[in-house]
Image (cartoon, rainbow, N blue to C red):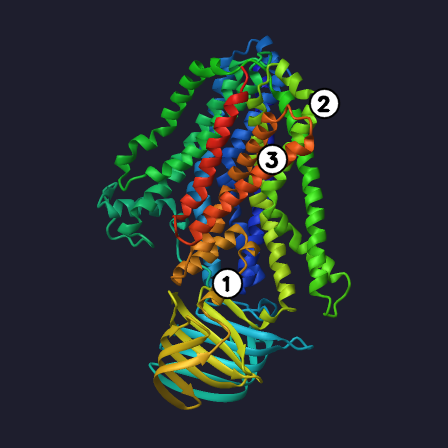
Amino acid sequence: MEKILFRKLLIDCSIFFFITLFSASIIIWVFQAVNFLDIMIEDGRDYLVYINYSLLNFPKIVSKVLPFIFFFSFFYVISKYELNNELIIFWNFGVSKFQLINFLFIFSIFLTFLQITLAAFIVPNAQDKARSFLRTSSVNFLESFIKQKKFNDTIKNVTIYSDGKDKDGNLLNLYLKKEENINDFQITYAKKGVFVEKKNTQILVLYEGETINVLNDKITNFKFSKSDFNLKNLETNTTTYVKTQEVSSLNLIKCYLKLKNLKFFDIDIKNFTIENCMTANLNNVIKELYKRFIIPFYIPTLMLTILFLLLKSKENINYFKYRVFIFLLGLLIIISSEMSLRFIKNNIFENIEIFALPIITTFSIYLIIFFNLHSFRKKKMKTYIKFLSKSFLNSFFYVSLIMFSLIFVLNLLSELDFFKDINVNSYYPIYLSLLNSPTLIFEMFPFIFLISTQLFFINLFNNNQLSVFKYSGLKNSKILFIISSISFILGVIIITLFYSISSSLKNFYLDLKTNYTKDGKYLAVITKNGLWIKDVIDDKILIINSVKIDQNYLIDAYISEFNKDFEIKRNIVSQRIDISDKKWIIFNAEVFDKNEKLKFERLEMNTNFDYLLIQNLFSNLSSLSILELFELRKNYKSLNYSLIEIDIQLLKLISLPIYLMLMTIFSSVIMLSTKELKSSILKISIGLFFSVLIYYLFNFFNVLGKTEKIDLFSSVLIPIILLTTVNSLIIRKFNEK
């Protein structure tokens, strides 16, 4: 009978574990596959490459999520057995808790070796094959990949620009720059471009254009009525070099022995050729070996953590909190296992304490559980938490709905005024308002949380529910803890999900709106290939490329000047251009005019741009997701451009959950402090007054950060610290015992 019971438990745990593991991996894989699709589209990769690359990344996902899914699955099944009284059957048939713990512990060892197999052998092989697909695949740059009026830098060292398309889908007014360095490049201009398929190769056929070749200050050019631009053998910006995680485990071991001048079973490793094996990479090698062979041994630790559920009965008044504690402890172990990588040293023998961390952690868990379980409070909070969460979320929903409606109407009025003299469909302003409203409401979330909290407490006051809670022993501080935790979780959801959606909609909104603004002829953007500017002035079209910006100067710049018919007039090369105002000063200019090369120590050129306008025109930061902000920051940094605006935006987003939580607490303490007031409007007015001051305070310190009066972290942290201090002082007054 014992075998039957053990077999049933094992089957239930295994089925739930493998189904959950597969489902979670599929979901994560789908999200990553979408990102891979963007990369492949940007790089012009064949769909077969995309499919193979995506599928080969699936084992890595499985290996990554396995520890957490294992912990969650077995935690759930064991808890379910306890709650459904199924464990009583085990005890009735003479199965001891020790036997059950021992049985499941042995099974966890089996899963440990499964994880080692995945992490140490299957995943590196799959990652290596995935990278091979990128290394060996060619670019299949399709017409749809070129976006109108945008500088496309998909292909490495190549930038393509097109003014638009005609009714037949042909590209118009093309600009192509292919460069190796500042003194070695090729520029091609064409009035029309068409993609055609020749011998299974994508060819961009150019019509009515000119090609200029510059090599070591020597210039040659020729005009053409038709020319082919072959994209097959061009390399994209996608990384194709071998990474440590793609190297086989055996080669990693050999690499370590080689770098440490050690022998493996009397075999001299020094003569082995191992890719990416260098002294500078030694730490990464050890870390990778640790991830593959040591971290999987946290699985038995996690299993022992779960099995402590068996030590307490569900009838115990603390059982719910005990489960929560065990679950959080398991999460802590998972996080700690990954964090331990930071302490890895360059010698395996110096990392013995870290390698022994699973055993130490297991021992520590025993001590924590046995000596600290008595600290849990006896009162069950499940019912209170459910009620308060539902009430607060209802208030948040209604306030958000009302605020969105208000913002939508106001934005609609603005759009109607903008389009009053422009002939567009009547629904167009409504459509644009819907696209722009999520971004606007994002800025209003601090007020939404404040008003939601006020409405939440007004409902409690009106229904005398606060008195009931107090009589039941539920302190006001506990209520604050519950709703502030909800606010923090909502804040995390807002920056991870809502902000991603709103930024995408904002970007779409700006693309549509730009067609009706005077700035539509201007374009300034930073890509992997540097700073790019398109300008139209005095019947001239300017396309400007610069390696980087240094204060008010463009460094290593190239300017192409066209007439209104997109015919090349001249090209200007300069190592330094002063862009302080709209009359640029070009120093040591080399001017290529047809077949002539002229040199000027100083040359002036009128533009619509100065340094400030370029700074403002790069992008609307609210239209960029967090990942895009990090990518933009990387590009800005490579060009030595100011990072202040981006850093402020990132810090604001990262700190938003804390800010919203503090606003919720502040609104709560205001409502509790004014609960004797009978007028709800007066309570809300007091709260709004102080919230406006707080909002002003936050923005005031942001301005100080932007103007570099204080450092960026202080500009975000100081108001948070001040608000936390104020909340702490006020909360002491009504923390009833």
The percent coordinates of residue 655 (x first, y second) are 49, 42
Residue 514 or residue 671, whichever sits in front: 671
Residue under the point 67% across and 42% down: 400
The percent coordinates of residue 648 (x first, y second) are 46, 50
Q: Amino acid at mark 1?
A: Asn
C-alpha separation, residue under disc 1 versus residue under disc 3: 35 Å
The percent coordinates of residue 259 (x first, y second) are 25, 48
C-alpha separation, residue under disc 3 versus residue under disc 2: 21 Å
Secondary structure, mark 3, is helix
Left or right: 663 in relation to 643: right
Residue tagged by mark 2? 463
Q: Specify which label sits upstream in the sequence, 2 or 1.
A: 2
Q: Check whether the beta carbons of the residues at disc 1 and disc 3 lie within 8 A of each other.
A: no
Residue tagged by mark 1? 616
Residue tagged by mark 3? 687
Q: Mark 3, residues whose alpha carbon is within 10 Å: few (<14), some, or many (≥20)? A: many
